[in-house]
Amino acid sequence: MKIFCGTDIIEIDRIKKSIEKFGESFINKVFTSNEVKYCESKSNVKYQHYAARFAAKEAIFKAVSKTLNNKFSLGWKNVEVFNDENGRPNIRFIDLEINGLKKIDISISHCKAYAMATVIAEIDE
């Protein structure tokens, strides 16, 4: 068993500018419909939530990419970040199996200017 870690931080304004410039094409390329619904429900802080999910997807990739035969087999929408009934973030893989993945955990945080995520994955090799 090996433990892999991934972390990412991003400026919220960078995601906001991408959404304002590219609109639906950017959103639909990166986020699942459930993620969009969640972020849009946050109205005046929605960009913080979009950025947090963007950072989460980057952190997930960093944590599991060494286990993939082809690093390009993991796309933006193969991963969905969702909140459980207590508001805690969780990860769901869509149309993709991560070989040997036993456990995966995520922590997301954001403030006015930055969003970040850390992912820990336990993988049997």
Image: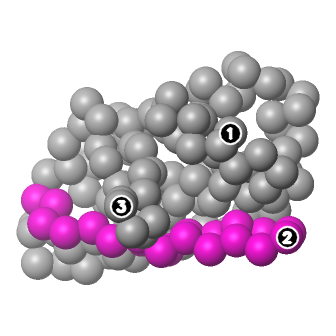
Magenta residue check for 29: no
What residue did someone put label 3 on? 85
**Residue 112 got which mark?**
2
In this view, 5 is above or below 63:
below
Three-letter code for the amino acid on which mark 1 is drawn:
Glu
3D distance between C-alphas at marks 2 and 1: 17 Å
Q: Nearer the viewer, residue 3 or 47?
A: 47
Determine whether, in the image, residue 92 is placed left or right of residue 60.
left
State the image quarter where residue 8 is shown: bottom right
Q: Residue furthest top?
A: 25
Three-letter code for the amino acid on which mark 2 is drawn:
Lys
Determine whether, in the image, residue 13 is placed left or right of residue 93.
right
Determine whether, in the image, residue 105 is placed left or right of residue 57.
left
Q: Residues within 10 Å of mark 3 (few under 14, many from 20)?
A: few
Q: Pick whichever of labels 3 and 2 is earlier in the sequence.
A: 3
Q: Residues within 10 Å of mark 1 (few under 14, many from 20)?
A: some
Q: Which residues are magenta?
A: 100-119
Q: Nearer the viewer, residue 97 or 35?
A: 35
Q: Secondary structure at mark 3?
A: loop
3D distance between C-alphas at marks 3 and 2: 25 Å
In this view, 65 is above or below 116:
above
State the image quarter where residue 93 is shown: top left
Q: Nearer the viewer, residue 70 or 22?
A: 22
- Does residue 50 appear in the picture of this structure? yes
3 or 2: mark nearer the eye: 3
Q: Pick whichever of labels 3 and 1 is earlier in the sequence.
A: 1
Residue 105 at what x, y percent from top left?
33, 71
Q: Residues within 10 Å of mark 2 (few under 14, many from 20)?
A: few
How many labels were placed on the picture?
Answer: 3
3D distance between C-alphas at marks 3 and 1: 18 Å
Instruction: Tell me the quadrant of the picture where the N terminus can be found.
Output: bottom left
Q: Secondary structure at mark 1?
A: helix
